[in-house]
Image (tube, helix red, strand yellow):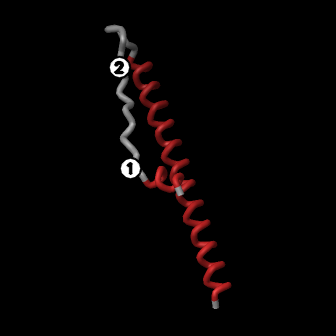
Amino acid sequence: MRCLVVVLSRQSEPDCEFKATESKTDERMKLDYERQCYRHAEMIVRNRLELLQNSVDTTIKALKRTEGGGS
């Protein structure tokens, strides 16, 4: 049940702003960093969605077993 609470909690927006340590930052480096950051954030969200879908499937199957055995 704890896993379901984590999956249902609101996902914070990714902080993908490139924070340059040098004043001379290549634009391609910035774009690559941001692209990778958003890609990683999407992977996390997709994984959470899959966990949620699996949890819902498990719940539905349990309910069907309960309904079938209780009649």
Tell me which corner region of the image, top left, top right, bottom left or bottom right, holds residue 19.
Answer: top left
Verify CB contact (< 8 Å) between mark 2 and mark 1: no
Residue at 58%, 72% (x, y): give it: 60
Amino acid beneath label 1:
Arg
Per the model, the C-alpha gap separating discs 2 and 1 is 25 Å
Mark 1 neighbour density, 10 Å: few (under 14) some (14–19) many (20 or more): few
Residue wearing tag 2: 19
Q: Secondary structure at mark 1?
A: loop
Q: Nearer the viewer's eye, disc 2 or disc 1?
A: 1
Amino acid beneath label 2:
Lys
Residue wearing tag 1: 10
Q: Is 68 above or below relative to 9?
A: below
16 vs 71, nearest the viewer: 71
Q: Position of residue 14 (x, y in %)?
A: 39, 37
Residue at 32%, 8% (x, y): give it: 23
- The quadrant in which the C terminus is found is bottom right
Q: Looking at the image, which residue sits at the far bottom?
A: 71
